[in-house]
Image: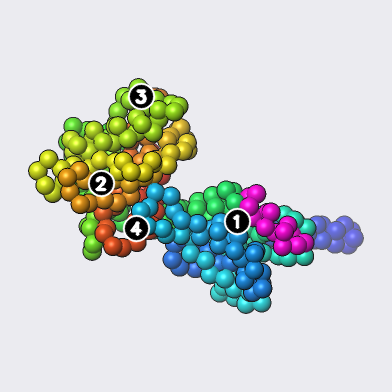
Amino acid sequence: MKKILGLIIAISLFYGCNDENAKRIVPKSSGGSLNDITVVVDNLLWENNVGEVIRDTLAAPVEGLSVEEPQFRLRQMPPSVFTGFATKNRTVLKIEKGKPANTSILADEFAKPQTVVVISGQTNAEIIDQITSNSAKIIDAFKKEELKEKQRRIRKSLFNDKAIQEELGLSLKFPTAYRIAKNEDGFFWLRRDIETGTVDLMIYEVPMSAIRKGDSTVVDVVRVRDSVGKIHIEGPLEGSYMATENKYTPFISKTIIDNKPAFETKGLWDVKNAFMSGPFINYAIEDKVNNRMVIVEGYVFAPSVEKRDYMFELEAIIKSITIK
């Protein structure tokens, strides 16, 4: 009887320990600035070709800005000091030389929420190959973590978007710092004043046929946004209006927004007959249920200041959309 009782206790302890491991408690990750990545790598590797490839990959310029700004800010530290509070950073890239070549993306490894990318290789060449061949996957993992954090911060003080819901049948999570500057014929213009200008959003719908798929997609996106800008976004001078800067071809790609196919277009806008310009990010979302394309665009007017963080805020807001 004692043997049976002892066996039962041992089994209970075994499964209890496993359950504790499955539910291991990790500390909360540190707040910190958005789009900052801690790079844990030996100083010698950071200073040679491995560090160069890391910088070229993660600190590459953001698409669609008139002045180059890095996608991520990088803070390097050697493995010996990656302890304690340093392990709580929200995004971490860890380089491990002398191990089999591999790239792992880990969630909540040292803190929560957290994304840790571990890249290993026996040689510098193997590490570099892992970085370059997995660059899109690595960038996507870090960006998703930062978008999620930005959206969490936005949710702390949300604007009541009832008017948008009733008019367009969609919901968007944006902070109370914005105001509805125009609500006219199914067109919404949202604005946030900043010290050097404004951060703006436009929301409207067009027929499915307005934006064709294929080589003409970017042409259609530009044509639609220019026609809307001419009607709704007046410039400071008589006859001036917002349009697409025609000196540069916008970047366009396919994506998924609210589980729906969408086109993402990044480029520069200007005001015809006036000296105003800046970057924009435009999403044309295919809403088959309602037989329409939902257009949500963000743009910034902020002369002489960096615009990356403003554009990132707009992207986070747009990607919170729920179409009913």
Q: Nearer the viewer, mark 2 or mark 4?
A: 2
In reply to whether residue 202 is colored magenta, the answer given is no
Residue where numbered disc 3 is placed: 208
Q: Earlier in the sequence, mark 1 or mark 3?
A: 1
Q: Which residue is mark 1?
A: 107
> Neighbour class for label 1 at 10 Å: few (<14), some, many (≥20)?
some
* Depth check, front residue: 131 or 8: 131
Q: Earlier in the sequence, mark 4 or mark 3?
A: 3
Q: Is residue 130 magenta?
A: yes
Nearer to us: label 1 or label 4: 4
Q: Residue at x 19, y 37 (%)?
A: 230
Q: CA distance from mark 3 to mark 2?
A: 27 Å
| Residue labelled with disc 2 | 270
3D distance between C-alphas at marks 1 and 4: 29 Å
First in sequence: mark 1 vs mark 4: 1
Please report contact status of discs 1 and 4: CB closer than 8 Å, yes or no.
no
Query: Helix, strand, or loop for circle 4?
Result: loop
The magenta segment: 121-134
State which tag comes first along the sequence, 2 or 4. Answer: 2
Q: Residue at x 48, y 64 (%)?
A: 73
Q: Which residue is mark 4?
A: 307
Q: Nearer the viewer, mark 1 or mark 3?
A: 3
